[in-house]
Amino acid sequence: MENLSILKDKNPIQILKNWLREAEESPEISKANVMVLSSFNIRLEGKHKISSRVVLLKEITEESLTFYTNYNSLKSHQLENPSALNFYWPALNKQVRLEGETKRTNRKKSLQYWKTRSRESQISQYISKQSEKLDRRSILEKKWKETQKKFHGEDIPCPPHWGGIIFSPNLIEFWVERPHRLHERLVFEKDPIRKEWQSYLLYP
Ligand SMILES: Cc1cc2nc3c(=O)[nH]c(=O)nc-3n(C[C@H](O)[C@H](O)[C@H](O)COP(=O)(O)O)c2cc1C
């Protein structure tokens, strides 16, 4: 098994891509792109000042990771602040933690991705008031059927409040489980001015 120290001078995004590929190729992992997104907004009333949920990674570039969501959802109200992502693949005994900032994809990019979705899931996104209270499940099911009929023979329009979130990491930590709890941790931090990654090890 690779030793994390030898990756100290590598590009952390490339390491993450390699780990994602390893997870995708593992027969024991069904959704390698599952990531937990944590976000907060202390200005929100009552609960929900801080929360986590699963989202799916749809694109990774040298600078960022993209997922898609509803811009009116709880998470979107929290993403004006820094946020964090976490991957854990039990079959590989590996974890990756990321901290960073987010922004929205432009409309053209959101539309491009919208077109790749199935008609059924487009309808679900079209009618969902994600994170709002729903009195009865039957309301949602009725709305789904009505919308299916309403757009019969036509494309389902992408609602303006649906699209991508681009997460740009400024810290990435790679973690590997080792015997006797002597786990390995390798952190990369991005210099905010020079935009270069610097790495160091952490005690487990
Ligand atoms: C496997 C899995 C994948 C999911 N993928 C997404 C996703 O890509 N985008 C999304 O908005 N919600 C996704 N969800 C639902 C979220 O976890 C969450 O319930 C929803 O986004 C509302 O979160 P919020 O109220 O904190 O905004 C997924 C859930 C699971 C379990």
Image (tube, rainbow, N blue to C red):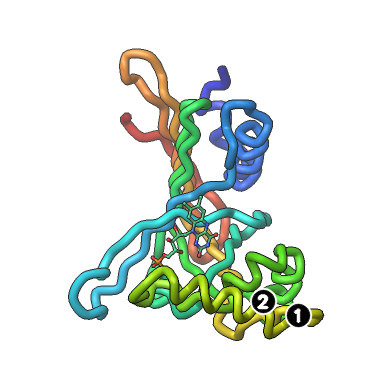
Q: Amino acid at mark 1?
A: His
The circle on residue 123 is: none
Q: Are marks 2 and 1 in contact (CB under 8 Å)?
A: yes
Q: Amino acid at mark 2?
A: Gln
Residue pictured at 39% horizontal, 72% vertical: 131
The circle on residue 152 is: 1
Where in the figure is residue 74, as x and y percent of width and height?
Answer: 38, 73
Residue linked to disc 2 = 148
187 with respect to 143 (left or right)? left
Residue 180 picture quarter: top left
Q: CA distance from mark 2 to mark 1?
A: 6 Å
On the question of residue 78 being in view, the answer is: no
Disc 2 is placed on an element classified as helix
User: Is 191 or 79 nearer to us in this picture?
Assistant: 79
User: Is 183 or 140 nearer to us in this picture?
Assistant: 140
Ligand 1 closer than 8 Å to label 1 CB? no
76 with respect to 110 (left or right)? left
Where in the figure is residue 15, as x and y percent of width and height?
Answer: 61, 39
Residue pictured at 41% horizontal, 33% vertical: 185
Tell me if mark 1 has few (under 14), some (14-19) or many (20+) residues whose alpha carbon lies within 10 angstroms of its own: few
Disc 1 is placed on an element classified as loop
Q: Is residue 26 above or below residue 86?
A: above
